[in-house]
Amino acid sequence: MKKFALFFGALVGILIVVGFFLPTQYNVSRAQLIKAPPAVIHSHVNDLNKWEGWAPWLEEDPTLIIILGEKTSGVGASQSWHGKDGNGALTFTQSSPDTGIDYDISFNDGSYKCQALIHFRDLAGSTLVTWEMTGDMAVPVLGGYLALNMDLMVGPMFEDGLKELKSVVEENSNSKKPA
């Protein structure tokens, strides 16, 4: 038992030391090709009222309660939320029908802040939509481990959201074409 305790103590010590040296910055990025011009996609991304139709958060946490700000589209649009996994808020800082949106996001009463974007690249008839989030988990020891896992935690949600956005945009675009 004494050998096990020494081994376990050494292992914990190593994990703590390694944690101090791991990078705490992270970047999560996913992309999806959508058959629509940037301005059409922008109408779904720039309006927080429309996020419920494609954003993956409610599927991940059905207890989520989203509160829209006074302004719901364009620069300054905002929303906050709370659910079983905590709370957060976001505010649009940039918005363009040609290039997409940028927004600041915070979690757990502002304890963790990051920047995110949903950008467009016009590819003549289709648009490459990139959803990205960058930040710094500046928490001693644990921050590096959290940063290492951000892609695994957030990436699949971005993938699901982009697939839903593609479905919503392409379905709306096809229904508006003359028969």
Image (cartoon, rainbow, N blue to C red):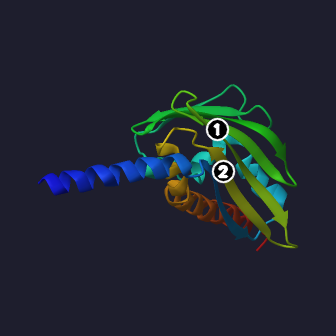
The quarter of the image holding the N terminus is bottom left
What's the residue at 65%, 45% (across, down)?
Answer: 135
Q: How many marks?
A: 2
Q: Kindly identify which numbered label has been placed on residue 77.
A: none
Helix, strand or loop under label 2: strand
Considering every residue shown, the one lying at the far left of the view is 1
Which is nearer the N-term, disc 2 or disc 1? 1
* Three-letter code for the amino acid on which mark 1 is drawn: Ile
The quarter of the image holding the C terminus is bottom right
Number of other residues with Cα within 10 Å of mark 1, as a class: few under 14, some 14 to 19, many 20 or more: many
Q: Position of residue 175 (x, y in %)?
A: 70, 66
Question: Label 1, on which residue?
Answer: 105
Question: Label 2, on which residue?
Answer: 133
Front residue of this view, candidates 164 and 21: 21
Front residue of this view, candidates 84 and 3: 3
Residue 176 seen anywhere in this rendered image of the structure: no
Does residue 128 appear left or right of residue 97 in this picture?
A: left
Does residue 89 appear left or right of residue 169 in this picture?
A: left
Question: Where 102 sits versus 75, above or below?
Answer: below
Q: CA distance from mark 2 to mark 1?
A: 9 Å
Number of other residues with Cα within 10 Å of mark 2, as a class: few under 14, some 14 to 19, many 20 or more: many
Q: Position of residue 151 (x, y in %)?
A: 56, 59
Does residue 28 appear left or right of residue 41 in this picture?
A: left
Q: Position of residue 169 (x, y in %)?
A: 69, 61
What's the residue at 76%, 57% (across, down)?
Answer: 41
Q: Position of residue 160 (x, y in %)?
A: 55, 62
Mark 2 near mark 1, Cβ–Cβ under 8 Å? yes
What's the residue at 58%, 51% (across, down)?
Answer: 55
Residue 55 seen anywhere in this rendered image of the structure: yes
* Three-letter code for the amino acid on which mark 2 is drawn: Met
Helix, strand or loop under label 1: strand
What's the residue at 73%, 33% (across, down)?
Answer: 77
